[in-house]
Image: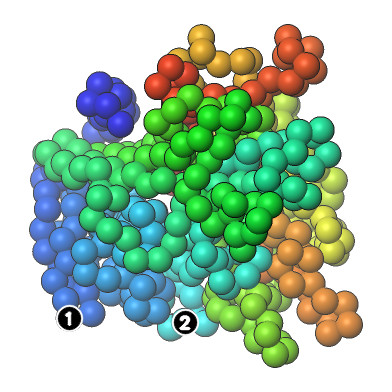
Amino acid sequence: MTRGLLAAIVLAALLRTTAPPAGAGAVVGCRDEIVSLQGMPQTISNCSDAATARIGELLARTDAAYLGLIRPGDRLMANNQWVVWIDTHDAPGILRGLWPVDADGTFLGVVEPGIAPDAAKDVLLVSKGYGSIYAPFGYKGLHVEVWKTAGPHSGIADECAPVHCFYSVPNGEQDANRLGSLEVAPGYSIATYRTALVNNLLPRTKTCWTCGTTTFVGLNGARTELVWEVGYVMTPDTFTVRASLGAGTDVTLTGAAGGLMLILNPACPAVPRRAYPGDDHFAHCDADQVSQRSFHRVSGPSIGAGATVSANIPVEGNVADMWAAEHRSLHPDEDRLIYQLDDPSPMTFSYGERSFRMTVTPGSYATDPGAQDPYVTGFATHFNATPRALGFDRKRRLSGLSGIASVDTFIQPATGGRCPKPVCSLAVGPNRGTLVWTMRLSHGGAP
């Protein structure tokens, strides 16, 4: 991330910062202080009005803390809307903890009694995995998927055929050079991290020699590494995540680039199911848990006009219900999704009828659009993946239901009449620029 781009993000965030409510105490500003977590001192960048000790009390009763996932050296941040945990041990600076609070540090989300009676439930997937509890790459709260081609039926094959290659962040112990920079000033706190993405397909074979490696061979034949960088910018009242994709050599790809995706926590604890020997899926949740404790109600200005809404999702005005009472029978391969193209309108997510609502405002662009073929930006949400991917088993009466969901920003090459070539592609590199995705996260307000 260049200093110019970083400054622009900070300035934009500062301009959005709102004044403290009437009667509120003076804003202290962002400062690095120490909290005790599981008996160990931890540094937290506290931009909130609340005392750091109060933020520490909340952190100590989060689901992540009860599970022993937060470790010394991980990055902790807080402001008047969020308490944040960034994993620097088992992921290269990946956002894994997001707990909603008010300016007093009071937790506003739901608890997870399956972990502890007072466990503050993470908005994001607190565990690791998606269709499986084992995830060698990605799937840890914030996720990345960069697809080399548009799929096995696109007419363009790669070394991963008959499926197609996608690249994501590595999991496992990380080294210090993943850290880009830390900066704390009275008006903001910034943390940046970078890593080379890994071909998510395993194992490495004679035909797929890039599988499980950081080597990326572009469709133009150039060989390099895809370098992903993420920055977290927090002010007292705003929290923005920015990710970018670049490369040391100019390379092309025809698949979609999902450079910034959030995996939302399921409705019950993301713990192993163990329904039979070798079962590696998450435990399933019952219909009532999903109704009350999953993000299935989605609202936004484009929901009723412009967004594409799949079947079995009723829409009333600008509100869609992905788990409506009249549509609680999921086909094993059903993917309930909402998406909008070239539309940066926000989406707001709520736990059923509960009052808490999270708003995600997306952004996607290329730093050098003149060096790109025509492209399309997208913003989407998928509810419950597909039951089959989550462990549906008719014979064993396993539903494949958990209420897990994703919120995706992506960029993909234009097709049809918008593409002046037989096939358009994306490109990154020294002469082609970078691809960039942003999400501004906030909460409050009615849908």
Question: Residue 127's spot in the image, x, y percent?
Answer: 48, 69
Residue drawn at the location 18% of the way across and 52% of the way down: 45
Q: Nearer the viewer, mark 2 or mark 1?
A: 1
Label 2: element kind: loop
Specify the amino acid type for callout 2.
Ile
Q: Which circle's residue, 2 or 1, is located before the other in the chain?
A: 1
Question: Residue 75's spot in the image, x, y percent?
Answer: 25, 57
Specify the amino acid type for callout 1.
Gly
Residue drawn at the location 34% of the way across and 53% of the way down: 93
Question: Residue 370's spot in the image, x, y percent?
Answer: 51, 9
Q: Is residue 181 visible?
A: yes
Residue drawn at the location 29% of the way across and 39% of the way down: 233
Colour pattern of the rendering: rainbow
Q: Which mark is residue 108?
A: none
Q: Residues within 10 Å of mark 1 (few under 14, many from 20)?
A: few
Q: 421 or 248: which is nearer to us? A: 248
Which residue in the protein does label 2 denote?
115
